[in-house]
Every structure is written in structure tokens, then in C-alpha cells.
Amino acid sequence: MSAVIEEHHDDHHHGPDKGIMRWVLTTNHKDIGTLYLWFSFIMFLTGGVMALVIRAELFQPGLQLVQPEFFNQMTTMHGLIMVFGAVMPAFVGLANWLVPMMIGAPDMALPRMNNFSFWILPFAFAMLLSSLLMEGGAPNFGWTFYAPLSTDYGPPSTTFFIFGVHLMGISSIMGSINVIVTILNLRAPGMTLMKMPLFVWTWLITAYLLIAVMPVLAGVVTMMLMDIHFNTAFFNAGGGGDPVLFQHVFWFFGHPEVYIMILPAFGVVSAIIPTFARKRLFGYDSMVYATASIAFLSFIVWAHHMFTVGIPIAGELYFMYATMLIAVPTGVKVFNWVATMWQGSMTFETPMLFSIAFVILFTIGGFSGLMLAIVPADFQYHDTYFVVAHFHYVLVPGSVFSIMAAVYYWLPKWTGNMYNETLGKTHFWLSFIGVNITFFPQHFTGLAGMPRRIPDYALQFADYNMISSCGAFLFGFSQLLFLFIVIRTIKGGKKATDQVWEGAHGLEWTIPSPAPYHTFSTPPKDLSEAHG
Amino acid sequence: MIRAKSSQWITGLFLLLSGHAAFAGWGDLNMTRGVTEISREVYDLHMIIFGVCVLIGIVVFGVMIVSMLMHRKSLGAKPATFHENTRLEYLWTIIPIVILIGLAVPATGTLRAMYDAGESDLDIEVRGLQWKWQYTYLNEDPTREVKFVSNLLTPATEINNQADKGQFYLLEVDEPLVIPVNKRIRFLITSEDVIHAWWVPAFAVKKDAVPGFVHESWAIVEEPGVYRGQCAELCGKDHGFMPIVVHAVEQSEYETWLAGKQEEARLVYETVGKEWTKDELMATGEDVYARVCQTCHQANGQGIPPAFPSLVGTGLSVGPIDAHIDIVVNGKAGTAMQAFGSQLNPAELAAVITYERNAWGNDTGDVLQPSRVNEMLTGGQ
Amino acid sequence: MSDTNSATHYEPYYVPHNSRLPIFASIGIFLTVFGIGHILNAMTAGTSGSLGVTILLIGGLVMGFTLFSWFAVVIRENHEKLYSDQMNRSYVWGMSWFIFSEVMFFAAFFGALFYVRVFVVDWLGGVGDRGPSGMLWPEYSPEWPMLNTPDEARFPGPESTIPPFQLPLLNTILLVTSSFTVTFAHHAIKEANRKKLIGWLGLTIALGLIFLFVQAYEYHHAYVDLGLTLGSGIYGTTFFMLTGFHGAHVTLGTIMLIVMFGRALKGHFSGDDCFGFEAAAWYWHFVDVVWLGLFVFVYVLGS
Ligand code: HEA
Ligand code: HEA
Ligand code: CUA
Ligand SMILES: [Cu+2]
């Protein structure tokens, strides 16, 4: 260990180290945030390329590019990488950058552990990706890895997949402990909970979800590991177990997981819309309560992914009602955003465009979610492209759009430079059009009866699949423009002011742009700007 | 080749731009109404929720769009200062609850009807196997039980784009399930290996086939016809190649078919006793191999190691014949290698084993007679 | 809750400039699991796992040294009075939520046990409303503990189970007692009575070790005499997984206490500065509570 031990007071005298070791050894929340965000973007491209392999194979009926077994590996890896590698780390990256700046803290509460949380991830994903080269190929049982397909019939790389999940779990748990402790313990004096920006609130609740469910995921993969290598009978009826037990435990994790991917997005949008409507967020309190209700409800609805699995009717009814209830607090959020826009004085810069698209397209995804919640109808929708359409609407123009909105919104603060607005808007429109061309037709193919996770399909689904594939390439390649815009902004551009956006409120806008390496070494005195 | 591809992409884009006109009617875009009372109820339910969502969408997006058009800075809009309104917030909490209750009521009704199995006229065990379905007509009298496996019929040439695709590409099987109309059929759904799901959209029946458990579902089909579905749970490599075809026929036709099936089974047992020539066995064996074994062990016998072993030149296929018969008849628990003793008849088993031992350069010269396999089958029980 | 403790006055907060520890920890943990993965795959495939053993050894060493230095650094920084009360609160919160995550990990396994006991055992026999699954397992009849599994060939059931009111009861007494002794040790710190601290803490560790010994003995008995193994169907599965993970946590807790013992000998801890000790003690209590759950649900209600 370095013998230099600085008092925090001196911290602002230190800039970042030089060279690569800055990134490897850093304990600075901004550096770590940046690491997370770049990691996430690389994973997004990786998972995206896999999606493009899927879409290219599905461009027309028949097997053209890949064999079924490789197709299944692509589906699985695409889902896993997007969920655990792209969306979750992106939000952790945003939390790292923003939470301390929003609550007036000098850094994250446990800075070394923060670095640990990040650096586990590249190893975990390297291990996961290396399974593509292993004998027998990568995991091929879907991102939901149902037993016994994953236990008795999985490839040897399943073992490494399991340990990869363990590593991601450790990373997420440490990351969320850090977020919780930072928020509970490091707020500037006078920053009460109900004064925190909504992004901070949503992350606090998300962190609780993570701490509660990541260990359960670790538990279920451990059960798998034992079934594979030690002849235990968790998921084997012959020994008194039940394959459906796997699904219960998995979805007890899996459903809160999908809210983990959307709650921080709600926070981002709740920061951006007021700024560009130049009007305070409507219904701050109810936003907080709605977020908490969604989080609570998310624990008691898991079996809506398992309606066709043969659950007794009482269970089906209960899970249907509970699931439908989630529409109420989510509706509150949507209505609040609309009310914030109402009678505002709006401008439509790129972050706002992404946020508005978020509200509309996420709501469409929510509607299809509600349709899926209706058990008898779900018997027809389940495991078809209707489900694929549902979750891509909430995840791509939902979570991913919100991340992009956040990057455009805070990039000037991070880099000190404005991005090019014309390019940003071009990126938005290409993405918006691309995403809808890709995923809207999937509603139709799904209703018409096309199952998901198939490499080849019957002829009546051909037209819509072709459209969907075209959209996927349009959307995918538009993201290269995003990369270009971000790099250009980092390199230079018009200097950003401290407040950056005319309507922006919050502590992060009171500090200089670019944000100095250390902020709030002494807590801010004036919190009048704090409210989100 | 490249040109053909790019022209298809252009067609795709064209279809896109020309909007829906180029497509078949609404029927192809929407859920099927189906041919059972339940399936029509489900369809109606689907249309109701869909309608409700569209209406809410119009209201919410309408307000947003008006706001975006009118309350923009470029039009000189000044921001209002309100930021809460308790009455409004209560209202938009309560109205959705009311709407949801309105949806839950009919949904509950339909679900109850679906779970109310009643007294069945005919019980059929539906068993999923990697990657085919086995149907058993359960009967009071086990000797009259009819049992067969239903495989994908679409040839590999069509899948690999070496031949034109037929009308029912991927949705055709060698032996469809045959059921009488207007009878309450109970499906007892289970699986041999991994989870599959038996789904016929026209009946609104989708139920997971879970190994070790039996799940029930039922249908009363009202119109004769051919109904097609697919396996709806990822079950491994050929999950996409595991279709379901059901022929619903009039009762009399059903009975004729059933009698034919029973007669067929009897004939098979007669052939077991007879002495087969090697050529007969090889011909039948090649046939069976292509139909049953090829998905895993591949046409050239090389398999896809390590998941599916090669049968050429190594292992049991050129080793002691008893062990070879054993693995084909009894399978290997916990692997994809199934117990084919219950799927194929002794003649087919003998033929396919003979074929394996003499094809692809495995020239063992062994000839296995069905009677020998039959001994193992009956003796082994 | 923390409106009051959200630093109503300003305290200095120590932020280390950078650190080599986390990257080493990441490498260490990665090598560890990678090695174990190799060993397990080799074991199941029946090939040699020596490569895996090497990787695991390297990983374990890296991980061990890193953790050791990590704690050493934290202790040193604490001694150098770099930590404010607020910093200590961060550690308190951190440890609490870590324990909560452990609770959820056990919850998954308890959940599996309950689900199997309440539903699956009956369903497999065709009882209850999940279809006539009994037709697949004509020989099987629902009972708990499950001494006859549906597929006796692959999962031969155990002959009998462990009677709760013998060794398990002894273990319960041991652990509950140790929860008291560790509390006495804590009081000793508050009273600044080092002798007493060392005595009670030493006793706690001894109780933990005896517990582990009894547990090992019981496992041996189960495997050798009762045919109760990981592979003897769902009873053995849940029994060994729940008690096994608990045992692993007792081991970890004991190691933590031993470290605290060493620190106590070196004269660490004072009444207002003993977070390390407290963290270990909470962990110990947590392990104790889990055991009570096990005793009730696995042993008493399980036989
Ligand atoms: C970010 C991720 C995310 C989010 C936010 C959601 C949100 C919701 N999801 Fe989704 N879901 C997924 C990700 C997500 N989902 C994924 C990944 C899968 C598939 C997993 C797999 O199998 O691989 C899935 C699958 C899935 C299923 C299983 C389908 C199946 O396999 O058969 C169901 C069933 O109930 C469901 C329901 C819902 C509901 C009711 C919501 C609700 O939260 C939506 C609430 C929102 C609204 C309803 C819109 C706004 C509200 C209003 C404007 C108010 C007024 C409205 C009404 C009164 C109707 N989802
Ligand atoms: C957050 C999560 C997320 C995101 C962002 C996406 C993004 C996309 N998804 Fe994904 N998807 C899932 C989560 C997600 N998906 C999940 C959970 C599943 C279920 C998996 C399962 O069944 O188990 C799934 C399944 C799934 C399927 C169904 C597969 C099947 O059932 O067989 C399809 C098919 O169209 C699909 C398509 C796409 C497309 C086109 C995108 C596009 O948005 C992708 C955009 C493309 C890019 C971003 C590529 C950009 C890269 C380049 C242009 C190349 C640059 C190259 C270099 C720099 C070297 N996804
Ligand atoms: Cu069988 Cu999918
Ligand atoms: Cu869900």
C-alpha cells in the first residue's frame, strides 16, 4: 500500500493519476462511474452484435447463417449480456457519477469496495464470453436457464456460467451496499430524504431490490451447480424435487430484476422532463411513494412468468391480480410526467426527445405487460414474440433510451463540452424509428403464433420478420453515431456553462463544468438548489 | 448470391414503406379466434384489454401531444408553477383501479371455465421428447391402447434452402394427433426429458410438459379441421422444429382411424416373428434413422460432439452388440439419448441398429433380427 | 430513519486516493472460481483436474493475502484516527446490509425446502391440484421425511434421518450459549476489561469449534450409517445444503472471531472503538438465528 495517506481536506489538491493505473487503482466515484459506463457500452455493442446475428438469421425462413445450437447460444448470451452487462452496469455508472454530486457527498461511502465492484465485472464477462470458445459451446438454454435443460442437458461451460453469475451477484451486492450507505450516511447537512432528487430516491430503492434478490439468484445457480455436479435433486422429480421450483426461485429474482432495470430510468426521466419543461416535477411525493409501491409489489408477482406451468387456479388468480396492480403506481408516474409537461415551457433538446420517447414507448410496453398479466390471454401470448415485443419496448426504448438521455443530459457536466445538438437529434430520430420498426411488428408475429427462441419459422411470419430485421440493423448502426458523438464531445466542443441547461436544478449544476475531480470535500451550505 | 440477398433486403424495405397494404388481412396480425368456446372467450378478452389499452393510450398520449404542441418555449409559453394537486392525484389512482377491476372480472370467469375440467370423453397422454411428441390414447383396456410418435415431416432440404418450402413448412408432422369433434378431450401433458410446452392456438391450450409431473388441459373442438401448433418452451437445439398437428374429425371417422391404428399395431407384432434379410433391415433402418436419430447424430453419423456423440468407427456402434441394443432400447438417463424401446417397434429397432452397425463404414456385418430385440424388450421388463 | 444522523454537522470523511487492493481481490476471486469450475467439470467428466487445482491455489493465495492486507490497512487507518464517526457509521450500515443479503441467500434455500415439503411431496403422489402426476410414479407414496424417492434407482432414499433431540439439540445449546458468551465479551470491551474479553471470546471460539466438530461427526454418521447423502433425494439435498451452508458460515464466523481474538491479544478495541469486533459478533448472532431456523424446520419438523 502506498504510504501516502491524505486527510480528506487535501483531497482536492490531488488530480487524477496519469496513465492506465489511474483507472485500475482509482477510488474516485467519477472515474469508477466512467469505467462502468464504458464497460456497459462495450457490452451493449457485444450483445447488440449477437442480436444482429439473431435478426439476420430470422431475416427469412430457413437456416441461412447459423445452426440451431449456435442460435440458442446467441439468444442466451444476448439476453444475459444486455441485462447484466449493458443495462445494469450503465445504471450503476450513472449512480456513481451522480449520487454523490446530487446529495453533496465527497465520494461514495466505501470507495475501495466501489472499485472492487467494478473490476469484478470485466473478469466475470470475460469468463462468460470465453464459454463461446469452449467445447460444447456457450450456454444455450436462454437467459432464464430453466432446469433441467440447463442442469442435465447443459454444455460443460454451464459451470463457468454459474460462477460468472456468482461474480456478477457479488459485484451488484457490493455496489448496492455502497449506494445505500452513501445515500443514508453521506447526505449534506439539511438534505432530508424528501429533498433528495428522484434519481437518488429511485436508486436507493433499486439498491434495496438488488440486495434482496441477487442473493436469491446466487442461491438458485448454486442449486443448479449441486444438481449438475453432486447429484442433488432440487430440480429432479425422480428425487422428489421439481423443475418448477427452479422457476419459482429464478423469478423471485427475475421479476424484481426487471424493475431494477427500470426504476433508475424513472429517476433519470424525472430529472430531465422538469428541466426542459422549465417547471417543477409534478407530484414529487407521490413519485416517491409510487416507486416504493412498485418495488414492494415486484416481490409478490413473480409467477406471472409461469402462468402456463401448471399452477393451481388460486395461485394463478392471485398472481394475476397482484401483477395488474402494478399498473396503478406506474400509471401515477406516467401521469405525473405528463402533468409536468402540461403548461410548461418546453424545448426539445436531445435528452428531452429521448425522455418523451421513453414515456410514450415505455407506456406501450407497459400496456402489453398488462395484457400479459391477464392469465387466460397469457396462455396465448406466453413464449411468443408478443412477449419479446413487450420486454423490448420496456427495455430498449425504456431502459436504454433513458440511459442515452442521461448521457446527453449530463455529458456537458462530465466533460465540460456541449455535444453537437444536430447530431444528437439525428441519433435520436434514427434510434426512434429503428426501434419501432424492429419491435412493433413483433407484436403481430407473436399474436399470429410465432414462438420465441426459434431459429426458423413458418412461412406466414416471413414479412414481419423481414421488417423487424431491417429495423434492427438501422437501430444497431445508429448507435455507432452515438459513440461518435460521445467521443467528439469528450475531445472538445463548445464549452458548457456550469448550469448547462437553462431549466436545470440540483446540486450537480452548481459545481463547475467539467465537474472537478473532487467535489463537495466540504458539504454545500446552500441547498436551495437541491430539489429535483 | 449476394445479389439475391440484397434484393431481398430491398423487398423488405419496400414492404415496410408500403405499409400494411402488402400484407394479408387482419387475421394474420391478430390472435386466432379458434374453434373452442374457451378460445373464443380468450379472444374476446384479448380484444377487450387491447381496446382498453388503446383508449387509455389515446387519452394519455393525446394530452402529451397537445402539451408538446402548445406549451413550447418557441411559442412563447410561460411555465406554470403548480406542482401538485391532491384531488387529481387521487383521481388518477382510483380510475385505473376501477378499470383494472373491470378487466379482472371477465378474466377470472374465463380462467375458472378453463380450469373446470369436467368429465372427459377421451384421455390422451401427451409426452414431449427432444424434439417430438408422443401420444398415447389411454384406454380402460391397455391392450387396445394406441400410442405413436409424431415427428417433424419437413425435409432437411427445405430447411437448408435446397428445395422450395412447402405450404406448411415446419408445421407438418408424419403422424398427426386425431381427435373426434364435440367431445371433451382431456390432455395429460408430461415430458420425458426437459420442459416442453404443448400449444395449439386454435384451442387456446398451452401447457408446459414438465418431466416427472402430469399437467391437465382439455378442449372441446367444435369444427372438423387441421389445427397446427408448436412447442412453446425452449427445449434445446430443435425447439423450433417440434410442431403439433391435430386432426379434428367426426366421431365415425375417428373410430375408423382408431381401428386402423389398432390393426397396424397387431400387424407389427406379426412381422416381429419373421426372419428379415439384411437389405430389408438396412432399408428400413435408413428410413428410421433419418426420421428419428438424425436430428442428434446427424445424417453422416458424426453427431455434434460433445453434446451428441459420433456413431462412426467408435463406441458402442462398433462394440459389443448387447450394449448397443441396450442404449438404444433403454436410453441413458439424464442425457438426451432417449429410451427408444417405447417409441419404436422391435422391427424398427432391429433395423436401425443393423443400419448403424453397417452404415458410414461401420462394416461390422452384424444383422440383428427383430425377434431378438423383442426378447430383450419383453424379457427385460 | 437517518434524517437525524445525516450529518447535521460537518465531519471529515476519509477518502483514500487510490488502492491496489481491489484489483488484486478481483483477480483473486476470479482465479478462485475459475479454478473451482475446472475442478468440478473435470470431476464430472472423470478427467484430471490438476490445472484447476493450480489455478484455485493461486487464486486462493491472492485472495487470502489481499483480504489480509485489506483488513490490515483498514485497521491501521483506524488507528491513525483517519476515521470519523460518520465513517464508522458507513461500516455499520455496510455490515448490516451485507448480513441482510446473507439472510436472503438462506431464504432461497429455506424457500426451496418449504415449497418441496408443502407442495411437491404431495403432487408427486398425485395428491393436490397439480394434475395426476402420481400415474408416473406408481411405487411412490407421499411422506416427509422422504425415505422413498420416486426414482429409487437414481436417488436411493435414506434409511432414516437424524433424530433432532440428540446431537442437533446439543449443537443448538452450544450455539445459543456462544451467542451469550460473545455478548459477555462485548460487555468486557465496554468495561475495558481485557482479561474478561479474552476469556469470553476464547470460550465463544471454543464453542464454535465444538459445534463444527459435532456437525462433522453427524455428517459422517449420516453418510456412513444412514445412507443419508446429497444424492439420496430431496431430503438429503435440502438437509445437507441448508446445514452445509450454515456450517460454512459458522466456519467463516469462527475465523472472524479468531481474528478478533488475535486483535484483542494485541490490545485493540476500546469502548467506543470496536466496530470490527461488533461486526464479527453480529455475524455470529446471525449464524445463530439461522441455526434456530434449521433446528426447527430441518430437524424437529423434518423428522
Ligand atoms: C424493464 C423491464 C420490464 C418492465 C418495466 C415490465 C413491466 C411489466 N411487465 Fe414485463 N417483462 C419483462 C420486463 C419488464 N416488464 C421481461 C424481460 C419479460 C420476459 C422475461 C422472459 O421470459 O425472458 C417480461 C415478461 C412479462 C410477463 C410474462 C409473459 C410471459 O412470459 O408469458 C408478464 C405477465 O404478466 C409481464 C407483465 C408486466 C407488467 C404488468 C408490467 C407493468 O409494470 C407495466 C405497468 C405499466 C403500464 C400499465 C403503463 C402505464 C400505466 C398507465 C398509463 C396507467 C393506466 C393503465 C391501465 C389502468 C391499464 N411481463
Ligand atoms: C436490456 C436488454 C436488451 C436489449 C437492449 C436488447 C436489444 C435488442 N434485442 Fe433483445 N433480448 C433481451 C434483452 C435485450 N435486447 C432479452 C432478455 C432476450 C431474451 C433472451 C432469451 O430468450 O433468453 C432478448 C431476445 C431477443 C430476441 C428474441 C430471440 C429469440 O427469442 O429467439 C430478439 C429477436 O429479434 C432480440 C432482438 C434485439 C435487438 C434487435 C436489439 C437491439 O436493440 C440491439 C441493437 C444493436 C446494437 C446495439 C448493435 C450495435 C453494434 C454494431 C452496429 C456493430 C459495431 C461493431 C463494432 C464496434 C465491432 N432480442
Ligand atoms: Cu420442445 Cu420446445
Ligand atoms: Cu415480471
Image: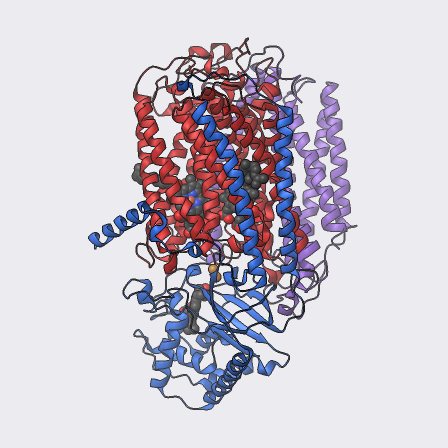
Visual hue assigned to chain C: purple
Q: Quadrant of the C terminus of chain C?
A: bottom right
Question: Colour scheme used in the picture?
Answer: by chain
Q: Can residue C68 be seen by looking at this rendering?
A: yes
Residue shown at 53% from the left, 36% from the top: A260
Q: Can residue C26 be seen by looking at this rendering?
A: no
Please count the marks in the image: 0
Visual hue assigned to chain A: red
Residue shown at 51% from the left, 80% from the top: B253
Quadrant location of ligand 4?
top right
Residue B48: x and y in percent read: 56, 49
Q: Quadrant of residue A404?
A: top left
Residue shown at 47% from the left, 77% from the top: B344
Visual hue assigned to chain B: blue
Q: Which residue occupies the foreground of this view, B371 or B125?
A: B125
Q: Which residue occupies the foreground of this view, B184 or B156?
A: B184
Depicted A497 relative to depicted A47: above or below: above
Q: Quadrant of residue B157?
A: bottom left
Residue A275: x and y in percent read: 47, 20
Residue C259: x and y in percent read: 62, 30
Q: Which residue occupies the foreground of this view, A162 or C262?
A: A162
Q: Quadrant of residue B358?
A: bottom left
Residue A212: x and y in percent read: 60, 37
Instruction: Pick out the residue farthest to the right.
Output: C165
Depicted B211 relative to depicted C60: above or below: below
Instruction: Pick out the residue farthest to the top.
Output: A525
Q: Quadrant of the N terminus of chain C?
A: top right
Q: Which residue occupies the foreground of this view, B300 or A389?
A: A389
Horizontal relation, residue A351 to residue A340: left or right: left
